Image (cartoon, helix red, strand yellow):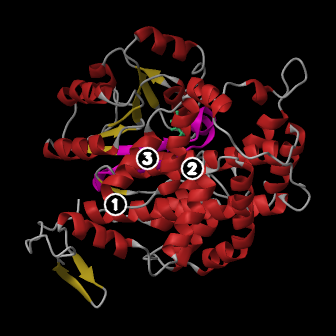
Amino acid sequence: MATADIGLIGLAVMGQNLILNMNDHGFVVCAYNRTQAKVDHFLANEAKDSQIIGATSIEDLCSKLKRPRKVMMLVKAGSAVDSFIDQLLPFLEQGDIIIDGGNSHFPDSVRRAKTLAEKGILFVGSGVSGGEEGARFGPSLMPGGNPQAWPFIKPIFQAIAAKAPDGAPCCDWVGEEGSGHYVKMVHNGIEYGDMQLICEVYQIMKEGLGMSSDEMADTFEEWNKGKLDSFLIEITRDILRFKDEDGTALVEKIRDTAGQKGTGKWTGIDSLDRGIPVSLIGEAVYARCLSSLKDERTRASKILVGPTSQVVDKSDFLDALGEALYAAKIVSYAQGFMLMRQAASDYGWNLNFAGIALMWRGGCIIRSAFLGKIKDAYTVNPSLENLLFDPFFTEATATAQSAWRKVIAMAVTQGIPTPALSTSLNFYDGLRHEMLPANLLQAQRDYFGAHTYELLSNPGTHIHTNWTGKGGNVSSTNYDA
Ligand code: 6PG
């Protein structure tokens, strides 16, 4: 009998917790997993005494869903998603809805939305953030795809989503095709950037200021009460305080090689493809790559010479460090929103930037008080060209400027690597320069390859100069990749 409000495929940690969350909000969920034993175990344990029901096959699952059917998949991104879609299709009807809640690469979601629309099936690719706890008690949800699906899934999605401090759900319709997964990808890229910035600050505290892990935890605790208030600052505080059995900080025993599942890399690659300088996320990905070259770094540490380090007095430096972190974070978000703006224009997506900031305000890994300010900026001006042009952020970076420069200068002098902090300031200085040295670069290209250049006084017209008097007057074709 068709009794379930929604079906959920995939009973790994995220799937199980989302089902329990939906159940808490009064929805009847039908659970399915490729291995039947997992369904039985879930129903007999975690889902005991709930209204959750199980399915023994895809056909059984589809027969138990109210019309239009809503099936959400939380399976590994890639071929498993296509395989489940293929298995579902024979048992679905026009107007039924398939939701992919995994970390799928957005071009796959663009493709799936198109091919399923041709079959009359409404596809939604939804970013889901917040890890296990978020899934259970309120994730950030970023659904995009076929807009006709939204009215049917909205009551469930907004009920189970995290709520911002003003009570607004951290879930709204993102836009067409693969835009939900695109926005989730950028979220993850920003997550990489935020984490890297915090890690650089930690290294400055440890090496440059000689602070103990407890002193560092105290500083993060203070920061978490002000404008840096965020989930990642909060967990960093807790990690730094955490002691191993021998009473020393566990974090110092962890091997310094970072893993990655690929979403930050996708953001970096996408930014290169679109020609948007999302340098901070790029540096954050490269920093993970460099960290993984542990053996080579170990050899280099014995060969390559750095400056003699001097411990700086921390008393007047910690405030500057907090300011530098804040300014760098502003630049990172400005870059992320630049990228989304470009993608929206490339794909014809109508992205609501204030809504995206609100979706990230709670529930997700990058949740922070700061996102409330971004939401305000785009609410006041939905077509804001650059986050840094919003008066609040212009003022915030201007105020932080001298501290920001002081911190980076100190790190450079001391030989402490700060790829993300440094690139944030370089981007800021680059953006505020009306004149960059690309005039010389264009001359070089024209000199050796007749690639042509434009004059400041006459943009749009490409000319070539015979710089040596020896070359010909024929210029190369003109195109930008
Ligand atoms: C989230 C996270 C999550 C991500 C992990 C691991 O929003 O809940 O972004 O989706 O997959 O944080 O990412 P890495 O393994 O690439 O660090």
Q: Is residue 284 magenta?
A: no
Find the residue positioned furthest to the bottom. Answer: 457
Which is in the foreground here, disc 3 or disc 1? 1
Residue ID for mark 1: 275
* CA gap, disc 3 and disc 1: 17 Å
Q: Decide: is 464 above or below 103.
A: below
Q: Is residue 448 left or right of residue 52?
A: left
Mark 1: secondary structure: loop
Q: Amino acid at mark 2?
A: Gly
Q: Are marks 2 and 3 in contact (CB under 8 Å)?
A: no
Q: Is residue 152 visible?
A: no
Q: Nearer the viewer, residue 198 or 466?
A: 466
- How far is disc 1 from disc 2 in space, using C-alphas? 19 Å
> Dot 2, crowdedness within 10 Å: few (<14), some or many (≥20)?
many
Q: Which residues are magenta?
A: 125-150
Residue under pointer 3: 185
Residue 35 or residue 195, whichever sits in front: 195
Distance Cα–Cα, label 2 vs label 3 = 13 Å
At 47% from the left edge and 45% from the top edge, which residue is drawn? 156
Q: Is residue 73 left or right of residue 13?
A: left
* SS type, badge 2: helix
Residue at the (80%, 56%) spot, across then down: 223
Q: How many marks?
A: 3
Q: Position of residue 358 (x, y in %)?
A: 55, 60
Residue at image mark 2: 193
Asked if residue 149 is among those painted magenta in the image, a careful observer would answer yes
The three-letter code of the residue at mark 3 reads Met
Residue 153 pos. (x, y %)? 40, 47
Camera sees residue 331: yes
Q: Residues within 10 Å of mark 3 (few under 14, many from 20)?
A: many
- Choose the circle earlier in sequence order: 3 or 1: 3
Q: Amino acid at mark 1?
A: Gly
